[in-house]
Amino acid sequence: MLFAAGFGTRMKHLTANQPKPMVKVAGAPLIDHAVALADEISPSVIVANLHYLPEQLESHLAPTGVKTVMETPEILETGGGLRNALPVLKSNPVITMNTDAIWHGPNPLKLLIEAWDATVMDALLMCVPPSRALEHSGAGDFMRASDGRLSRGPGVVFGGVQIIKTDLLEDIQERSFSLNLVWDAMFENKTVYGLEYPGHWCDVGHPGGISTAEEMLKSDV
């Protein structure tokens, strides 16, 4: 599941006439970088949710085989968007991926699949140490214990890629909601885990992230 429905307000003028996933980094739209990573794991289906200026993304993705799901009249956020796409995804668990970041190193989706243990995990999040999370401010999103379990607090940065079971989505009454609500329920059961990414990651949710990501991709680190 590729999250591609947002308004991209942090991108300012760059998203006045195009959706954020169409902003180019190193000559290719952000959505193309995400699709390339997804293609490497050969999933049965890739789905992108659309809302803001959807025609551009729909036209761009048509030749790739990525299926699109429209969110209308309102945007559904990450949790509502994922639940809305489940009839097309036809999978539990699913991999979700934000499309406003660039990864430099091993494919994070492959690493998550290798580490996934459905007997103890309800969610497995790819996390990045702040020292390798470029263009990200703050002390991190989660604390990661020695066994990999996550709890809320300063520590590692969530990179926007995860494997997550979808059962709890049906318990949310709101139509539009964040996946944070689902995580909260999972945290109570201590079933949210994190995997530390060994490479570098760059937030491209704002204009300054574009040049930083391009420099990162050129580097040998």
Image (cartoon, helix red, strand yellow):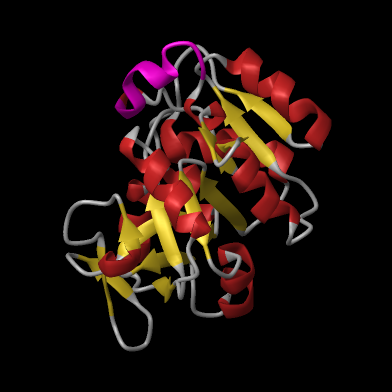
Compared with 216, 212 (above or below) is: above
Q: Looking at the image, can residue 144 be seen?
A: yes
Q: Which residues are magenta?
A: 10-18
The residue sitting at 74% across, 59% down in the picture is 40
Of residue 152 and residue 18, the one placed in the foreground of this image is 18
The residue sitting at 32% across, 38% down in the picture is 208
- Location of residue 210 (image quadrant): top left
x, y percent for residue 186: 37, 63
Q: Looking at the image, can residue 161 be seen?
A: no
Please indicate whether residue 181 sits to the left or right of residue 143 in the image. Answer: right
The residue sitting at 58% across, 42% down in the picture is 2
Compared with 160, 112 (above or below) is: below
x, y percent for residue 63: 82, 30
Image quadrant where one finds the C terminus: bottom left
| Residue 112 part of the magenta segment | no
Q: Residue furthest bottom?
A: 146
The residue sitting at 25% across, 59% down in the picture is 141
Please indicate whether residue 143 sits to the left or right of residue 67 in the image. Answer: left
Compared with 96, 7 (above or below) is: above
Q: Main secondary structure of the magenta part?
A: helix
Please indicate whether residue 89 sits to the left or right of residue 199 in the image. Answer: right
x, y percent for residue 51: 53, 20
Image quadrant where one finds the N terminus: top right
- Location of residue 196 (image quadrant): bottom left
